[in-house]
Image: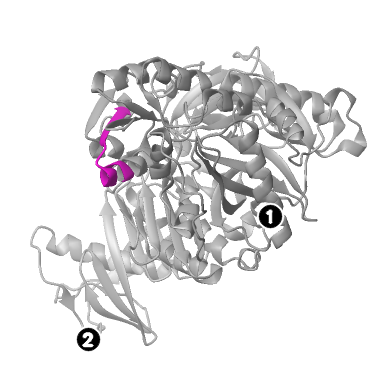
Amino acid sequence: MTISTLLVANRGEIACRIFRTCRDLGITTVAVYSDADADALHVREADLAVRLPGSAPADTYLRGDLVVAAALAAGADAVHPGYGFLSENAGFAAAVQDAGLTWVGPPVKAIELMASKTRAKELMAGAGVPLLAPVDPATAGPDDLPLLLKAASGGGGRGMRIVRELASLPGELLAAAAEAASAFGDGEVFAEPYVERGRHVEVQVMADAYDTVWALGTRDCSLQRRHQKVIEEAPAPGLEDALRTRLHDAAVAAARAVGYRGAGTVEFLVSAEGRPYFLEMNTRLQVEHPVTEAVFGVDLVALQLRVAEGEPLDPELPVASGHAVEARLYAEDPARDWQPQTGALLTLEVPDGPGLRLDTGYVGGDTIGVHYDPMLAKVIAHAPTRTEAVRLLAGALERARIHGPVTNRALLVRSLRHPDFVASRLDTGFYDRHLADLTAPGGGNPATAALAATLAEAVRATTYGTGPAPTRLGAWRNVPSQPQVKRYRSEPDGAEHEIAYRTPRTGTPEPYDAPGVRVLAATPGRVTLELDGLTRHFHLRRDRDRLYVDTAGASYTFTALPRFTDPATQTDPGSLLAPMPGTVVRLAEGLAAGAAVEAGQPLIWLEAMKMEHRILAPASGTLTALHAAPGDQVEVGALLAVVQEDLDATPVPASVPEETA
């Protein structure tokens, strides 16, 4: 069967990536889209598109019946699920096939067998795959600690808890089960030993219908936040050959045990002592698949389509070459509990060149909404050695121009250059140990960047609309004029900068009382300064009250203070404000005006971009007002509730994020 028209039952980056391969193969592409995604990049890039009415995932991308109907309406003959949403839903795979369409994925039975982590572990035990011994929470004792609670269905960290004290086990079980039921419709939770300082290592498999199973090397995905991967690489560094062989053999055994076909990933936890333990098998393409593609020189999506058409794989494995590293660029603020960000993405420019690849679902001018995962793009680097690949990726991220919501770009660059990462000392606790250092105010000189912003704005004020040539200066002169002052707040750290300048009769702005500074050129978009003999270029972009400044090795965002309003300054003490746009998903039981609350007590759960935030009582006191109800859509800064606190109470942070999916 030859595929001529393919519907991708997904959105964003993965849909765009699949469409790219389809264009190379001459396959017509069909997108589906929610109302929130009506102008999304994946819709613009598809040959055809079908609307799924609504914006919430439950009403759109998780409606298998609507997706199948869309495929039939568009004349598609095949469906690719991408990752996430319905990609590991056996019922959806069956519905696609029942409609006479080709399913670009594994057999329904394989999805069913691997859908439940508890049943998958039983099956893997029979296939000789190494496992962690399960722990019965009802009989767990001190020697079993720490424990990891996990949802039997689903993944991405939802329903996952680490338990270090027996007294907290009952409550964490209830919380994990509730979250699992909400996220996956299945509240089953199981427990297993939590491996301290373990590495997350996985094996990419590809199988056809003729008993050929490839093990396409290893990937290390240990750098994670809230059990979701941030940086991945292939091959996993520092593994002994015997361990690599054991992982490859176990992955092939897992695939054969379920009669697997297509692309899949077998995930392992590797202890500090080098012992591997099966975690799960993802019956789909992984987010991090590009690093394997780079190392083996293959197109995994093309191979998925080939297998779905009934073609065999080559008997011989492709030959691996070099090393590849991938970084996930998220619209989030790592320094503020990884809080997701929304708004207009003004600029997204990542350097292009040999060994670099960008997979993205956004371009400059798009808007980042509240409904979906905050990942903007994946940046991948491939080079002959790990050292070269890491350096190439860090440099590309550092030189990227990204204007709009706060991103994790600086964290990615620092992570790639951290001594532990450089030395391949990797484990899943990397960010637990190093986050404070990785998000501390960095190098560079924000005051100088603020000076460049001030000069550019002063030029803009005097030349707006005239489009003059750049003003070029050999130096600035101390001529009579009164200094003016601009004040900025740098984002997201909140530091304030006050810059004095003056504009002499020549009309060219000059810094005031700035020894060692020479202005070589100044336009609204570019300022060149000589700083103690070193020439630096500053590129600037303005959007309303915000100025984005890019220079070698650093990027800055400033907000002009006179026109900036903080919603928190306009509310009464004890007011609980929404930290982001989102949906109120639930309230604490019995919560109502007049209720007594304790410091740190979760009061309101807010969900946005697949992240759940608990709004906590800032101190013990009385809830005097409640303005939130389940289902409410709220904007950032919206007043949710007011707590009149006991003056003797100890304040706590007002919101705490839960694990992301």
Magenta span includes 26: yes
Q: Position of residue 565 (x, y in %)?
A: 38, 42
Please, what secondary structure does the residue beneath circle 2 have?
loop
Q: Name the residue under label 2.
A: 474
Q: What residue type is labelled 1?
A: Thr
Coordinates of residue 80 in the picture (x, y in percent): 39, 32
Q: Is residue 267 visible?
A: no
Q: Which of marks 2 and 1 is nearer the N terminus?
A: 1
Residue with the mark numbered 1: 245
| Mark 2 residue type | Gly
Q: What stretch is highlighted in magenta?
A: 21-32
Q: Which residue is drawn at 54% across and 42% down?
A: 212
Identify the image quadrant of the C terminus. Answer: top right
- Give the SS element for disc 1: helix
Q: Residues within 10 Å of mark 1 (few under 14, many from 20)?
A: some
Q: Nearer the viewer, residue 658 or 145?
A: 145
